[in-house]
Amino acid sequence: MTTPAEPRAIAARLPNRPGVYRMLDATGRVIYVGKASSLRKRVGSYFNKRQDSVKVARMVALIVDIEVTITGSEGEALILENSLIKSLRPRYNIMLRDDKSYPYIYLSKGEPFPRLAFHRGVRKGPGRYFGPYPSAGSVRDSLALMQRIFPLRQCEDTVFRARTRPCLQYQIKRCTGPCVGLIEPDDYAEDVRHAELFLEGKNSLVIAEMAGRMSQAATLLDYERAARLRDQIANLRRAQEKQGIEGVDADVDIIACASRDGVACVELLFIRGGRSVGTRAFFPRLADDAEPESVLAAFLPQHYLDGEVPDEIVISHAVPDQALIEAALATVSGHRVRLTAAVRRDRGKWLRLARTNAALTLGRRLASSASVRERYEALQEALGLDSLPQRLECFDISHTMGEAPVASCVVFDADGPAKSDYRRFNIEGVTGGDDYGAMAQAIERRYTRLQKGEGKFPDILLIDGGAGQLGRVAAVLDELQVTGLTVLGVAKGETRRPGAETLLLMGREQPIFLPPDSPALHLIQHIRDEAHRFAIAGHRGRRQRTRNQSPLEDIPQLGPKRRRLLLTRFGGLQALRRAGVDDLAQVPGISHTLAQAVYDVLHGESV
């Protein structure tokens, strides 16, 4: 059996050079990865003195072997340490669980009418990428805002080239119709240039230029153009009031950490081009209680060494090896990076906000049920999502033999049902019983409003239906140019029993089958059943209102007094239905034409 003296002897023989060390247990599994400027001193410190930390003492008791890799510098060791932690996932390292590819806003280049769109993945297309953004929802919110100010096209090139008439985006004034020549290339290019300046944070320059063009248009008596520019300026000013960071005009990340009861929360506030584009909370895995300084020291390399690095990172706690981390981030990013812990004025104000958010988010995390988190994590894994979903929407249709159809939209967030965000849609102009058409109408009405900024986009859209429903929904979303959205159809299966659902993920050929005891399936069933309940309640209310309404109210020429006169003369609606046109015309105030209209309505004919 291996004794503790053996790893101590290994440590004594290590060189005084920088590198990475890996601690192994009796099964040969790596339980800890660390870096050092001197391997002998750092590794020897684990065995040459009494450990005050319970976590370290527990880990040292398990060590039976040590492996090392010598590097050229401590900076190289930091980069290698980060890579090994992510690949080996050692038990005693602080681990960043939520490692994802961030979304960007993409502005294409090299074509007469560039495209502004959502992008996630490899950035190899010709054009500019603005970001990263904390979530797909924040990208969609920014795009919706920009479409109100700079109505650039978001459609794919294949759709753009095939258009012969303006799409719905043009009708709701979110695009200027370049596909069919409704805007001059020079005017479109000006919108593109202003959109770039806006994304770079140069709002004041854009407003000044637009104000000059508005004055020029008014001088030339082009009042329609002047009014359009006035509205654009007003939207820009509102965007500044809502998102502007006073005194900050660069790309800055503001990070605050709070830890308690063995749980840590890292709150990250994204500022891009002087605008706040959203926040994101991380919950690193802790091997034991960890101080915020240790959590941030582990978080910074894991989060930034493989991704986009801003010019400045403001942190709530000073971290060990700050200069080393700055140098490593500068090496991978190709530009100078500043880590700042002591800030005042504007940055201090935003750091205080991030600290408050971190404390509140940690409190909610500790107070929330573990089963809720487990269900969301299971759904993320089942669907292969890059990040934990934060907002889900589910739609369902309810009617009785085609009568009074109602569509429901229910919303779940990290805390469960968000009932204040529930919506119902009375379906009109659709053939009775056409669930496909009803679903398409509901999705179009809902997501047209979201495109206009009247609500938040979800991370996942669930549809109570199979492949047919999913196809109609996909067509509507494509027409509205809603991208970056995970769409899931929930089919009941052949037996139609709970637990036998088939999940159809848009863009994936093979269906997904989850076991009946899957927490992800339980979450899907919960939101599906809630959508069904909400749709039925709406349908019953609409049906009752319809049945309580007299058909005579559908006749515009027939006022309340003459309605009462008819019902009094014939003794009620049933007797009124048995009357002929001539009988109706004998009532004072009822002409033969009006009598014919009453007869037609009572016998199912349109007025």
Image (cartoon, rainbow, N blue to C red):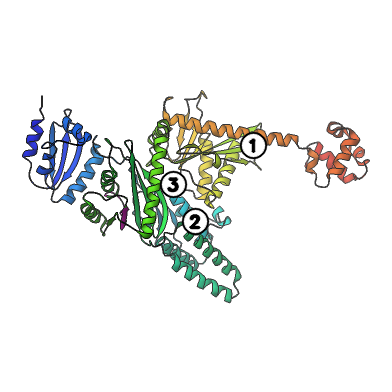
Mark 2 is surrounded, within 10 Å at the Cα level, by few (under 14), some (14 to 19) or many (20 or more) other residues, namely some
Mark pair 1, 2: CA separation: 33 Å
Image x and y of residue 599, in percent = 84, 39
Q: Quadrant of the N terminus?
A: top left
Mark 1 is surrounded, within 10 Å at the Cα level, by few (under 14), some (14 to 19) or many (20 or more) other residues, namely many
Q: Secondary structure at mark 1?
A: strand
Q: Secondary structure at mark 3?
A: loop
Mark pair 3, 1: CA separation: 30 Å
Residue 73 magenta-highlighted: no
Instruction: Give the residue pinned by disc 3.
Output: 484
Residue closest to the eye, 434 or 309: 309
**Principal SS element in the magenta part?**
loop
Q: Which mark is residue 550?
A: none
Residue closest to the eye, 102 or 483: 102
| Between marks 1 and 2 in the image, the one whose residue lies nearer the viewer | 2
**Marks 2 and 3 close (CB-CB < 8 Å):** no
Instruction: Give the residue pinned by disc 2.
Output: 145
**Marks 3 and 1 close (CB-CB < 8 Å):** no
Q: Quadrant of the C terminus?
A: top right
Mark 3 or mark 1: which comes first in sequence?
1
Residue range (magenta): 305-314
Q: Which mark is residue 405?
A: 1
